[in-house]
């Protein structure tokens, strides 16, 4: 099930988010486990792309990503996260690095012929060497992961605003105005958008302004689900813009 972000409270109160639910209970309650599972499902893609960037083929990266999240959810790996100081983004990157380090250690033990019988990741033919555990000297920069995270946040915000338009019977309007959210307006002047929607150019300008405003609200709400400190929410938003703007 894919979850949809909700708007942050207008009165400024910082509502209990999925990440704060996880932190408060350290994964011990049904609610915390559900919240962690939802976050893992929502942010599967940044981990997968991070593993692909390290040089693994698609099947291996997918397999490792599935194994990583399965272990994360099953083992409640949250003991090192300090209450009130955790960003899910940062936690996730640290956790996947730790996971890869464990996999490399495991592979080295196999190569040395360590006596223990390995517990294989579920691969097609059971050969551990095909897991393609990369050399840590060729590690992918953290900023790459953060950029994939930012893309995922933007994609989720885009899906959320599209669903709202569809629920209001405005699917065609969203399809026409979407370029003003994704930076693809060169081929569609506002005058042409107005013609397609049978609106005045002034009405289109207003519609674009409202669409962008709602999109920003949904992005903010999405990020608010993955951070446990309201003071840091604006910092996270600024950082998202920064990594997306980086060349």
Image: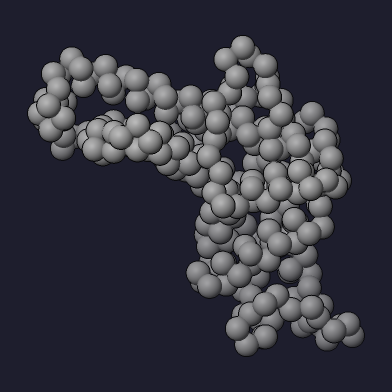
Q: x%, y% of residue 221?
A: 55, 29
Residue 21 quadrant: top right
x and y, in percent, of residue 237 in the image: 54, 27
Q: Position of residue 108 (x, y in %)?
A: 77, 76
Q: Nearer the viewer, residue 201 or 29?
A: 29
Identify the residue at horizontal 71%, vertical 37% (top origin).
Answer: 19
Residue placed at 42% from the left, 28% from the top? 215
Where in the figure is residue 119, as x and y percent of width and height?
79, 78
Is 217 positioned to the left or the right of 107 in the image? left
Up/down of 155 relative to 242, above or below: below
Above/below status of 238 relative to 59: above
On the picture, is 217 further left or further right than 1?
left
Q: Residue furthest right?
A: 115
Residue under the point 54% across and 35% down: 5
Q: Is residue 231 left or right of residue 154?
A: right
Q: Please count the marks in the image.
A: 0
Give the color scheme: rainbow, by chain, secondary structure or one colour.
one colour
* Residue 33 is at least partly visible in this image: yes
**Is any atom of residue 158 visible in this view?**
no
- Quadrant location of the C terminus? top left
Residue farthest to the top? 11
Residue depicted at x 62% and y 74%:
132
Work out whether 17 lies above or below 59.
above
Which image quadrant for residue 173?
Answer: top left
Residue 105 located left or right of residue 199: right
Q: Residue 247 or 11: which is nearer the viewer?
A: 11
**Foreground pick, 182 / 146:** 182
């Amino acid at each position: 099930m894919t979850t949809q972000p909700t708007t942050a409270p207008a009165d400024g109160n910082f509502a209990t988010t999925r990440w704060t639910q996880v932190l408060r209970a350290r994964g011990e309650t049904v609610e915390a486990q559900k919240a962690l599972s939802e976050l893992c499902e929502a942010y599967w893609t940044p981990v997968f792309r991070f593993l692909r960037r390290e040089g693994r083929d698609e099947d291996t990266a997918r397999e490792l990503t599935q194994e990583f999240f399965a272990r994360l959810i099953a083992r409640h790996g949250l003991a090192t996260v300090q209450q009130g100081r955790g960003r899910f983004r940062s936690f996730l990157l640290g956790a996947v690095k730790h996971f890869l380090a464990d996999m490399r250690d495991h592979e080295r033990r196999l190569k040395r012929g360590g006596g223990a019988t390995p517990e294989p990741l579920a691969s097609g033919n059971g050969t551990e060497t095909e897991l393609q555990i990369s050399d840590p000297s060729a590690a992918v920069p953290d900023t790459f992961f953060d950029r994939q995270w930012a893309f995922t946040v933007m994609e989720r915000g885009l899906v959320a605003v599209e669903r709202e338009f569809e629920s209001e019977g405005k699917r065609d309007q969203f399809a026409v105005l979407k370029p003003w959210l994704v930076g693809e307006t060169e081929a569609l002047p506002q005058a042409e958008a107005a013609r397609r929607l049978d609106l005045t150019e002034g009405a289109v300008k207003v519609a674009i302004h409202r669409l962008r405003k709602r999109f920003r609200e949904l992005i903010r709400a999405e990020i608010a689900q993955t951070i446990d400190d309201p003071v840091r929410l604006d910092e996270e938003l600024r950082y998202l813009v920064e990594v997306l703007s980086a060349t």
